[in-house]
Amino acid sequence: MTALNERPAVGTADAPGASAPEIRPARKSASDIALTVWSVLVFGFLFVPIIVIIIYSFNTGRLLVAWDGFGIDAFLTIFQKPAIQNAVMVSIQSGIIAAFIATTLGTLAGIAMASRPGKWVGWFLVLLLLVSVTPEIVDAVALLPWLVTLGQDFGLTLFNNGIARLVVGHTLFATAVVSYIVRARLAGLDAQLQEASADLYATPIKTFFKVTLPLAMPAVLAGFLLSFTLSLDNTIVSAFVQVSGATPWPVYVLSAVRTGLRPEIAAVSTLMLLLTLIALAFVAFVLRRAGDSATQIARTMTGN
């Protein structure tokens, strides 16, 4: 009787040769399908124009709007026009310098907000938020007379230099971005690590370089690269503060559009886009090597 009671029932999943119940995939609802279609339309609206510019950068025609054939003539033209080379070099130089300054100031601000919380942090975040949300046209209109006053009335010739003006204008917004990113990186870290360093008789400066800065380094590097990419496409501020002989690439494109958009403009834009994507991919790679998940990478990149 015991053996009979222990035999598996016929037709159950435990019986020999019994098949597992078939799991049918859930059918998508109408709302899911509508959201999918809407997402495809939004991404198409955002990225199709960029894809078109990339394709037309290989146009051999005289103007961008007229397709004559496929070739790399537009890319070769870059090396034949000093004006284009100068505009690209001005953008790269000002972007690198602005990124260094913004990263230095933003890193110090982000570490201070994360390690020394208090009422002042709220007020400081408000100031950073004002810098972030203020329209660029307002910043540009305010910067231009101020830089002219410093350069002419106060005799500070540094502010008569085109690169210096661009660096000042680009650093303002980039510093706020770096501050958000570094603060977000250090906000969830254990403060006892710094206390342990102090218990081991490390000076504050040594603790900063041996403990705090290495912990924040992925965010610092991310902030540097983001600052550089933000500087490359800053058009409004650059158009106001730039001087003759130091025209950055976005301003050059803006003036070139008035006389007709040529394929070499699209070619350089394609190269700048590639440079930006490489920088962003490197940021994601560094954060991934630091152990961050995809969600944490997105939060770090947005400063949340």
Image: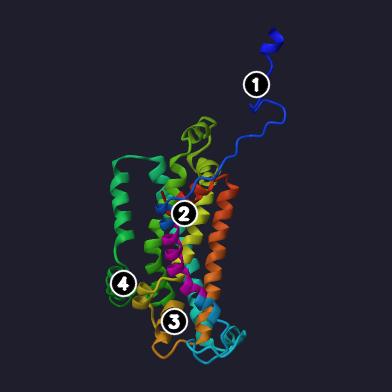
Give the percent coordinates (x, y) of residue 187.
Answer: 43, 41
Q: Which mark is residue 253?
A: 3
**Which residue, given by chain and number where applicable, does mark 2 sit on?**
301
Residue nearer the viewer, 186 or 31: 31
**Alpha carbon of mark 3 to alpha carbon of mark 2: how far?**
28 Å
- Identify whether 191 is placed above or below 269: above
Label 4 amino acid? Ala
In the image, 269: left or right of 106? right
Pick whichever of labels 1 and 3 is earlier in the sequence: 1
**Image depth: mark 1 or mark 2 in front:** 1
Q: Residues within 10 Å of mark 4 (few under 14, many from 20)?
A: some
**Alpha carbon of mark 4 to alpha carbon of mark 3: how far?**
18 Å
**Which residue, given by chain and number where applicable, does mark 1 sit on?**
9
Per the image, label 3 sits on a secondary structure element best described as helix
Q: Residues within 10 Å of mark 2 (few under 14, many from 20)?
A: many
Q: Which residues are magenta?
A: 36-51
**Image depth: mark 4 or mark 3 in front:** 3
Per the image, label 2 sits on a secondary structure element best described as helix
**Image depth: mark 2 or mark 4 in front:** 2
Give the percent coordinates (x, y) of residue 61.
Answer: 54, 91
Label 2 amino acid? Met
**Which residue, given by chain and number where applicable, does mark 4 sit on?**
140
| Residue 87 lies in the magenta-colored region | no
In the image, 12: left or right of 189? right
Per the image, label 1 sits on a secondary structure element best described as loop
**Image depth: mark 1 or mark 4 in front:** 1
